[in-house]
């Protein structure tokens, strides 16, 4: 499922901390979900810079494929892109690479649902869709 590293416009640089590795000295698998959260937050701040326009999302489903281990103090590029947008949900693809390299460590897909103030699924605003499409350079809906 992996794409070329260049297919991702957004990447967040992250250094692996000691508390993120297991007894084998590699990043503990659940930490990749935390990395995804960091990357998603950075992506949204970059693509939708106004806090008032940002969409509130809940993760409905995430799949991760682990490709190669990552060790303490390594730097990763946490890459994210929006793949498609439905009425209330969006699918994001992600890949984590060794910093500045085509060095895939993990990849996957995350289905995220936009919610309203009552935490119910809600239509993603057209203004947010327009910003996402402009950033990605293609139609997403």
Image (spheres, grey):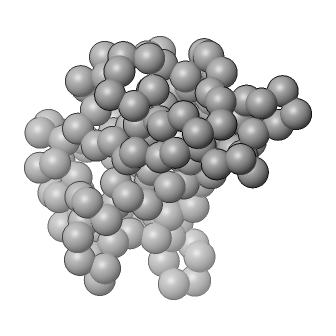
Residue occupying the far right of the picture: 23
Residue 77 x, y percent position in the rendering: 41, 37
Task: State the image quarter where residue 70 is shown.
Answer: top right
Is the residue 80 above or below the residue 128 in the image? above
Foreground residue among 92 and 98:
98
Residue 26 x, y percent position in the rendering: 73, 29
Q: With 51 as the anchor, is 14 left or right in this view?
A: right
User: Residue sitting at 31 percent across and 65 percent down?
Assistant: 45
Task: State the image quarter where residue 29 is shown.
Answer: top right
Residue 102 x, y percent position in the rendering: 36, 16
Q: Is residue 82 visible?
A: no
User: Residue sitting at 55 percent across and 22 percent down?
Assistant: 105
Foreground residue among 104 and 80:
104
Residue 64 x, y percent position in the rendering: 63, 29
Q: With 89 as the anchor, is 49 left or right in this view?
A: left
Q: Which quarter of the rendered picture does the C terminus lie within?
A: top left
Is the residue 110 above or below the residue 69 in the image? below
User: Residue sitting at 44 percent across and 17 percent down?
Assistant: 103
Q: Is residue 125 visible?
A: yes
Is the residue 8 above or below the residue 112 in the image? above
């Amino acid at each position: 499922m992996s794409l070329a590293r260049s297919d991702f416009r957004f990447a967040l640089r992250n250094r692996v901390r000691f508390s993120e590795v297991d007894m084998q000295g590699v990043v503990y698998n659940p930490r990749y979900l935390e990395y995804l959260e960091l990357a998603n937050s950075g992506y949204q701040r970059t693509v939708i810079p106004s806090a008032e326009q940002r969409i509130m999302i809940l993760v409905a489903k995430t799949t991760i494929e682990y490709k190669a281990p990552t060790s303490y103090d390594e730097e990763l590029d946490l890459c994210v892109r929006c793949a498609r947008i439905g009425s209330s949900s969006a699918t994001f693809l992600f890949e984590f690479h060794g910093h500045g390299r085509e060095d895939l460590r993990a990849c996957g897909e995350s289905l995220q649902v936009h919610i309203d103030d009552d935490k119910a699924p809600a239509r993603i605003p057209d203004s947010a869709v327009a910003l996402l499409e402009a950033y990605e350079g293609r139609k997403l809906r």
